[in-house]
Image (spheres, helix red, strand yellow):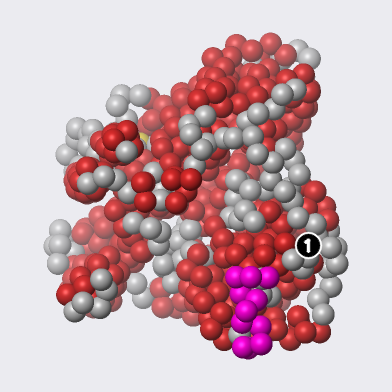
Amino acid sequence: MVLLGALCLWQASVIPTTPLYAQVGPKFVPYLVGGLVMVIGGGLTLSALRGGWSAQMEEVRDAPPTNWRALGLVGAGLLANLVLIDWLGFVIAATVQFVLVAAGFGSRRPGRDLLIGLAVTLGAFLAFDKLLGVNIGAGILEGIL
Amino acid sequence: MDVWSGLSLGFGNALTLTNMGWALLGCFLGTAIGVLPGIGPALTIALLLPITFQVSATGAFILFCGVFYGAMYGGSTTSILLNTPGESGSIITALEGAKMARHGRAGPALYTAAIGSFIAGTIGTLGISFLGPVVVDLALQLGPAEYFSLMILCFVTVSAVLGGSALRGLAALGLGLILGLIGIDLQTGQPRMTFGVTELLDGTDVVLVAVALFAVGEALFLAWRHHDAKQQVLEVGRLAMSKEDWKRSIGPWFRGAALGFPFGVMPAGGTEMPTMLSYYFERKLVRPKYRHEFGTTGAIEGVAGPEAANNAAAAGILVPMLTLGLPTSATAAIMLSAFQSYGIQPGPMLFTTQAELVWTLIASLYIANVMLVVLNLPLVGLWARILKIPTPQLYAGILVFATIGTYGISNSVVDLVILYTLGIIAMFMRRFDFPTAPVVIGMILGPMAENAMRQALTISQGDWTTFITRPVSVCILALAVIALLGPRLWGLFARRRGLVP
């Protein structure tokens, strides 16, 4: 419960970030929105301090405990993509991501996932690149594709 | 242009082979994503936005509307066979539909949902054709001040009235408004809230935000709570409805459609409320002979009514979008941004400046509806098979498409970082029950509202009372205040009187 309350509080404190702006004239609306968000954030913090609302939610109460392994693997997949996409290109980076995410969701056959991932990303790449003319960047596979 | 000549022009255009092809593709895709739990029409249309670089506006919008209608049809299949609603409008369908399926009546449930969707979709589309021009005539009388008030009303209803908590809805809206502020100010050219990052000068892309919210956030949230449990897909069984089923469905179909459409048209759009209302109505109105079926073996009325309401509301949502340029759902907001990427300004002028596009679009809605019934009834087995795609590969695939959708537009890693960061925020929002639709709506409507406000102030030479001295504007603002505070004051009042413990 305490942990939940803390998480709610953190959530609330993330929201009231007052916007950053410098010039005159177009400033009014950002001020307005910033102020509004501060007020809402205050309200949220208040309700979080009162114990939060999530404890009353059926979905949360019955939910299984946090699955760190799944979350970690999916996160790793996203991160891998981020790091790899610039120098290895979309197809390879996204395939790595596919395998890691699939593993995160409980797939036990990385080999098969690798093949499916490759097929999906290649298909998506070709569809976007050739049919729609969207340049995605083939990376080191540039010459082959 | 009057309705009939508009429609005949529209049908003439829509019945060409290419446009029929787009409609069919849209319907097919829409049904598929409607069936798959976890992805909805908003995400799909966001990912399809790159086609606006290549395809004509007409083709693209026929495709988008096909997806939009198709998702409504597909959602019911998932609700009935899996007891997991494919999208928010079919939560209620899952109540009775899944119970029917468990008692071997999945076939009639799917059948009544499809026919009900067809009837309601057709009624809704008729509504668009005839109501649209009327709303346009009214809308042409409105100035920027009224527009601003309308948008405020839209903000309030979308975030504070729908959903569990006004505070959380408004918080989500605030996040969207802030995202909408990022970039160069339209009227003065000053950069705002860019933190000095040049990539942010262009503003945040709608696709990026939608994909982050609906794909990345959703996938992370599911991973957070993931456990290896197999979900059972129920058997379809015999499809046909008996004479009894027909008799019991007809009333709910029309009542549901009549209930759903007005809700969609109102700026308080959304499909949840009318489906819920329809369910309660049918429960009250059902003949005593069948009353025991509600909540036990599953009553066909409880599927037919809400499904019809759901589709009629979806059609209704298109009315404010096409006539006023006001999106009342996340999907409509993304379609609106597609209009913008063609340089078309949605609003009352659309029916005159882009008459051909609008009427072709409306005509293709009729066609899409027919296609969807044909696609859904015989192919229901195929859709049921889609449900058997294992979760790991499904979500891995969704994330790959999420990446291609964002990276493909800009080739920038900064965008991917934003995508994943927003995705993480979205995961926490899901976890703590914040609605996500207000974010998208705030982001798209926010800059429009700001523009309208500043135009109104320019016209009135900086006089703030312009919003409360113009009669229409003040009425709309009053409605917004009532919508925001009404339920709370009523609750307070009821407690005072001791009506509610």
In the rendered image, the vertical position of residue A131 relative to residue B354, given as above or below:
above
In the rendered image, the vertical position of residue A141 relative to residue B139, given as above or below:
above
Is residue A117 visible from the viewing direction of this image?
A: yes
The image position of residue B454, as x and y in percent, is 25, 55
The image position of residue B174, as x and y in percent, is 31, 47
Q: Which residues are magenta?
A: B287-297
Is residue A30 visible from the viewing direction of this image?
A: no
Name the residue at 56% across, 50% down.
B42
Q: Would residue A97 be found to the left or right of residue B353 on screen? A: right
In the rendered image, the vertical position of residue B83 relative to residue A115, given as above or below:
below
Name the residue at 66% across, 71% down.
B298
Q: Nearer the viewer, residue B352 or B285?
A: B285
Task: Say few, some or many: other residues with alpha carbon within 10 Å of mark 1 (under 14 / 14 to 19 / 20 or more).
Answer: many
Query: Which image quarter: residue A144?
Result: top right
Q: Would residue B218 be found to the left or right of residue B76 on screen? A: left
Query: Which image quarter: residue B144?
Result: bottom left
Q: Nearer the viewer, residue B489 or B353?
A: B489
The image position of residue B477, as x and y in percent, is 25, 69
Name the residue at 75% across, 22% down.
A109
Of the residues shown, which amino acid type is indicated by label 1?
Answer: Asn
Q: Which residue is the site of mark 1?
A: B376
Q: Nearer the viewer, residue A57 or B80?
A: A57
